[in-house]
Image (cartoon, grey):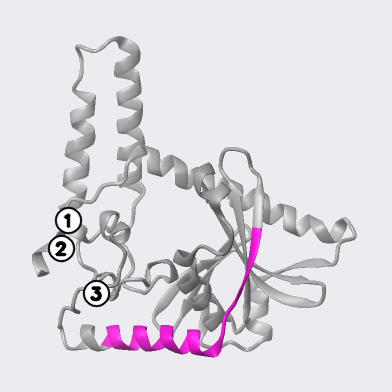
Amino acid sequence: MARSKALLNVLNLVNTQELPIEKQFLNDLKASIELQDVKNSRKPSQTYKPSSLHCIRNMEYQRMGVPLLGYRTSNELIGICESGTDRHERLQEACIAMKANNIDCEYINVAEYVKQRKLDYLEVVSQQGNETKLFHKGLNMSFLCDGIIKYKGHYYILEIKTETSSKWWERQGVNPDHILQGTAYSEALKINEVIFLYENRDSCNKKAYLLVVTEPMRERLVDKIHECEEYVANNIIAPKPLDVPKKYCAYCQYSERCKQDG
């Protein structure tokens, strides 16, 4: 249903023959970007994602494979994601180059790290460039890892984020929205410290902050996933949490289904 609505929306953009030719071209370009994204899109996997652990109901919908009612990605958002991916790759290469520049920093191959540390509960799904896709069998959680670095003799998980100028200039620490994600990575890779590297999309200025993950943080995350699994197993929709900020609801891809469930 979501896909058919997306197609209808972008095709409506094309039907603008009375506009000046440059406007027609622009609308057709936007429509093509969104149509191509629909063609390339895959059915979301029914696994937990570290970046989507704020709302237990959202987690359950993801786990159940609930259709995305009326949800459509805009060409602007597609471009932002592509730009972020490009910068991730550049920054990963810059981290790799540190060792060659006589800096005590080694970029660790995540797949080899998993094998050497005998983290048998982790499956290396794929490696694309310097990014590794992992699946946590015990928690039914899949995620992309930007990397692990060994800096001055100590291992850190590296997580790269790009953000708007307004957010970057106000940034004074790890974004609270990213703490659960860092905790999930820590639980999976058994590394207690995560370096978040934030880059300003407009100026490419950078800030870095350290998240130290504690055992109670990991326990709370695991308990939340186990709680969600119970709702899924019993086919019961989780109560809508009252402590989730409204901004998550505004951008939630399951918002229409959530309204239906009350």
Q: Which residue is mark 3?
A: 241
Please tell me whether residue 219 belongs to the stretch shown in magenta: yes
Q: Find residue 41 and report its horizontal and vertical position in percent.
A: 34, 52
The C terminus: image quadrant: bottom left
The type of residue carrying mark 1 is Leu
Q: Find residue 63 and report its horizontal and vertical position in percent.
A: 28, 74
Label 3: few (<14), some (14–19) or many (≥20) C-alpha neighbours in 10 Å: few
Between 106 and 251, the one lying in front of the other is: 251
Q: Are marks 3 and 2 in contact (CB under 8 Å)?
A: no
The type of residue carrying mark 2 is Arg
Q: Earlier in the sequence, mark 1 or mark 3?
A: 1
> Which region is colored magenta?
208-229
Between 40 and 159, the one lying in front of the other is: 159
Tell me the quarter of the picture where residue 148 sits: bottom right
Q: Earlier in the sequence, mark 3 or mark 2?
A: 3
Please tell me whether residue 245 belongs to the stretch shown in magenta: no
Label 3 or label 2, whichever lies nearer to me, is 3
Q: Is residue 152 toward the left or the right of residue 146 in the image?
A: right
